[in-house]
Image (spheres, rainbow, N blue to C red):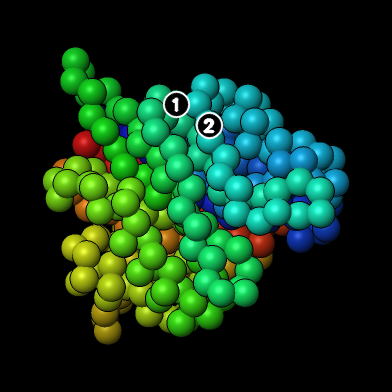
Amino acid sequence: MKFKLVTYNIHRAIGLDRRFKPERIIEILKDIDADVVLLQEVDEGAPRSNELNLAKEIAQACHYPHYQLGHNVTLKKGNYGNATLSRFPIITESNIDLTIGNKKCRGAQYTQIQVQKKTKNLTLEVFNLHLGLSAIERQKQAGILFHSKEFKKIQAKTPTIIAGDFNDWRSLLRALFVEGFDFTCATDTSKLWGESALKTFPSFAPRGGLDRVYYKGRIKHLNVNRYQDKTVKIASDHLPVVVEFEV
């Protein structure tokens, strides 16, 4: 069975014009029409986003029957973090705290998604993360993720996806994921001198491959692209990454 996944840092639905317009994010996601949506920087109850539960608003507007929001940052009023929206049932959800010392709070939302293939139900293990701004911080956060009870219980052949905003400008984590833990990077683009990340930031003139998708197990990567139109260049500071898989 084929399915489509998108990862998108929506910047709290506040665009580069500094306007809070969740309808732009909704329009983009409707057009992408993915089966599984991984969002970062999603507000709940914050004044800057009209105290809305953005995960709920977006899920309902885009007709996703299943959604979960994991809180990473507690504001004076409200919270924000990562959200997973799905057309398939989400059977398990937890939030892995990736905060390092006194650095900004970060996290990885873990969900088990039940995908039906003909008459058989398959489990898809998904980690939706947002890593820190320094290389040492990100290395430590990857270590926390790989030593978490959620990751350690996954069997080698189980379809597993780790995606989100890695903030990994120089691809320093790639070797750990690919060589250390046997993942494949769906957002690599082949170059004559090796592999280069699909560039997604900043949205109006992408120079960095911050938004990435890694996968392993009994899952096949079919296609990857950046979603680009006039709206997406202003709706957030990141571009959405769309990947098609087959399980």
Q: What mark, if any, has residue 87 been given in the picture? A: 1
Discs 1, 2 touching: Cβ within 8 Å: no
Look at 23% across and 47% down and name the residue there: 154
Q: Is residue 156 left or right of residue 143?
A: left
* In the rendered image, the vertical position of residue 96 relative to residue 91, given as above or below: below
Q: Please identify the quadrant where the C terminus is shown.
A: top left
Is residue 231 at all visible to an observer of this figure? no
How far is disc 1 from disc 2 in space, using C-alphas? 9 Å
Look at 68% across and 31% down and name the residue there: 57
Frontmost of labels 1 and 2 is 2
Sequence-earlier tag: 1 or 2: 2
Residue 55 lies, in percent from the top left, at 63, 37
Look at 40% across and 40% down and name the residue there: 111
Estimate how packed mark 2 is, as few (under 14), some (14 to 19) or many (20 or more) residues with alpha carbons within 10 Å: many
Look at 66% across and 42% down and name the residue there: 25
Q: What mark, if any, has residue 67 been given in the picture? A: 2
Estimate how packed mark 1 is, as few (under 14), some (14 to 19) or many (20 or more) residues with alpha carbons within 10 Å: some
* In the rendered image, the vertical position of residue 244 relative to residue 193, given as above or below: above
Question: The residue under label 1 is which amino acid type?
Answer: Arg
Observer-nearest of 176 and 21? 176
